[in-house]
Amino acid sequence: MTRLSLVEQINLKKTYLCVGLDTDLNKLPKHLKGKPTGALAFNKAIIDATKEYCVSYKINTAFYESQGVKGWDLMQETLAYIPKSHFTIADAKRGDIGNTSAQYAKTFFEVLPFDAITVAPYMGEDSVRPFLEYDNKVTIVLGLTSNAGSNDFQQLLMMPHNESLTMVPHITQGNTEKRLYEHVIERVSSWGTIDNMMFVIGATRASDLDNIRSIIPEHFLLVPGVGAQGGSLEEVSKFGLNKDAGLLVNASRAIIFASENEDFAEEAAKIAQQYQIEMSTYLS
C-alpha cells in the first residue's frame, strides 16, 4: 500500500487507528483457549469486528514466533485474512548487517507480504538500507519509545563539538545539545523519503511530539502506548497530526482483550469505534 492510499483510507474512514494483533494465547477467551484453531478464530473475529474503524493492523511477531512453526502459519493466515484496504505492519524490530537485513526484508516483504516492518537503527544505515530498496513498502524506524528503559540511551545528550554522550537531566548551554533520539531521527530521515519511511514514537512521550514534528514534519508516525499503556490520544493528536494526518495510533490490549468472554469481538468493536469517533473530531 502506498502513502497516498493510506491517506485516502484515513480521510474516507475518518480514523488513523491501528489495531495491534498481539495475540497472547494465555489471554484468549475460555471458549477458544487450548483449541488448535482458537488463535486464528480469535484473530479473524477481531479483524471482522474492527476493520470498519481502523486503517491498519500491526502484528507483533513475537507472539507468533514463540509458537514455532504453528505460530508462523498463524501469522501467515492472519495476514492473508486482513483486507487489502488496510495497511499491514510486521512489528518485528529487525536490523543487522546488510546481507542479514536483506533476508529479513525478504521474509517480511516477500514471503510474508506485509506493507511495512519496524526496524531498529542502532547498527546504522547499512542495516536499514536493504528494507528501503523495496518499492511500495515502508520501513518504520524506532525513534523514541515509550518503555522506561528508553531513558538509558535515547534521552542522552549529545554534545555539539566532540559528540560525546553524557547523562544530563535537562538541556543546558542554550539548548545547543541534542538528545540522542533527535540525532537518530534527523539522520535516519535522510536515508529515505516520506513515502518509504515512518518512525515509531511512543505515546507516553506526547510532550516530545511537537519537537519531533519540527525535525520530521511530513513523515508518518506509528504511535504505540495509547490505551493500556496510558498514553493520551488527545495529546498525541494535538502535537502529531499534520496535513496528511501523519499518524497511525496503535491500540492492542485495550481493544483485542476488552472482554474475556464470548462477546470479545463485540466489545472490541465498541472500543475501536470509540477511538474512531474521537479521531474523527481531531481530523475535522
Image (cartoon, rainbow, N blue to C red):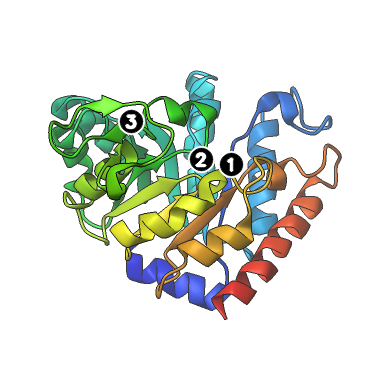
The mark that comes first in sequence, 3 or 2, is: 2
The mark that comes first in sequence, 1 or 3, is: 1
Residue at left offset 74%, top offset 40%: 257
Asked where in the image residue 36 lies, by quadrant, the reply is: top right
Residue at left offset 45%, top offset 31%: 150
Which of the two marks, 3 or 2, is nearer to us in this view?
A: 3
Name the mark on residue 94.
3
Q: Residues within 10 Å of mark 3 (few under 14, many from 20)?
A: some
Q: Which residue is mark 2?
A: 59
Q: Of 185 and 82, which appears nearest the observer? A: 185
Residue at left offset 23%, top offset 51%: 189
Q: Position of residue 78 (x, y in %)?
A: 54, 42
Q: Amino acid at mark 1?
A: Leu
The local secondary structure at tag 1 comes to loop
Which of the two marks, 1 or 3, is nearer to us in this view?
A: 3
Q: Position of residue 246 (x, y in %)?
A: 42, 64
Q: Of 273 and 161, which appears nearest the observer? A: 161
Q: Amino acid at mark 2?
A: Ile
User: Pointers 3 and 2 in contact (CB under 8 A)?
Assistant: no
